[in-house]
Amino acid sequence: MGLLIIGFESPDPQAKDDNKHYSMGFNCGGGTTAMALWECMRSYMEIGPDAVPDSQLGIAPFEETQIGSIITDLRKGDLIGVVWGVFCVAILGTYFAEKLQNLKLSHPPDLTDPAIIEWSKPLPPEQWAQRSPELEQALRLRQVGLEQVA
């Protein structure tokens, strides 16, 4: 299991001390799910919003939506899938909830504050975190141990 926590400071110079620091945590599971979430966040930060895949907002209802899955099940003759899909849409309101979620989350805000733009620029490679000498030595010892076993 994993948790991705992102911390940042408010760019507002008038912000009080108790309202200056923020953090967000994403429960990202483990393994592939955690790596996918991190890659999405990294791409967004390094490349920009265009790196994040489009959401379902504006896509025809036959593609990757609740209504689309009902139609696909109908075409395949999967009666249980059709009934379940109609139940979810009609009773649980999943299609409506999906559209509300897309309207809320689809378009990232324009962050035009110069401090945010400056902060959002990627670090130059010389400022990237470097491995400590202790870690390098531990990695070399581990590699030697693996080579001896093989």
Image: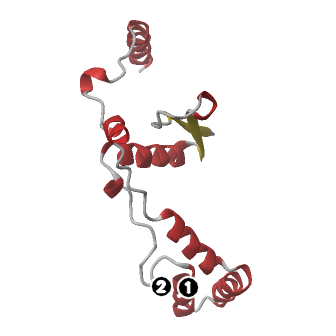
Q: At label 2, which amino acid type do we have?
A: Pro
Mark 1, other Cα within 10 Å: few <14 / some 14–19 / many ≥20: many
Mark 2, other Cα within 10 Å: few <14 / some 14–19 / many ≥20: some
- Which of the 4 image quarters holds residue 122? top left
User: Where, quadrant-wise, is the N terminus in this rendering?
Assistant: top right
- Which of the 4 image quarters holds residue 84? bottom right
- Residue 57, percent across and down? 45, 74
Earlier residue among tags 2 and 1: 2
Query: From what the image shows, is residue 58 above or below residue 129?
Result: below
Q: Nearer the viewer, residue 3 or 82?
A: 3
Query: From what the image shows, is residue 23 above or below residue 149?
Result: below
On the picture, is 9 further left or further right than 125? right
- Residue 77, percent across and down? 58, 92
Q: Outermost residue toward the right?
A: 91
User: Where, quadrant-wise, is the C terminus in this rendering?
Assistant: top left
Residue tagged 1: 67
Residue tagged 2: 61
- What residue is at 25 percent from the left and 28 percent from the top? 124
- What residue is at 55 percent from the left and 85 percent from the top? 67
Query: From what the image shows, is residue 65 above or below residue 78?
Result: above
The number of callouts visible is 2
- Which of the 4 image quarters holds residue 78? bottom right
Q: Are marks 2 and 1 in contact (CB under 8 Å)?
A: yes
- Residue 132, percent across and down? 40, 11
Query: From what the image shows, is residue 71 above or below residue 128?
Result: below
- What residue is at 41 percent from the left and 13 percent from the top? 148
The secondary element bearing badge 1 is classed as helix
Q: At label 1, which amino acid type do we have?
A: Ile
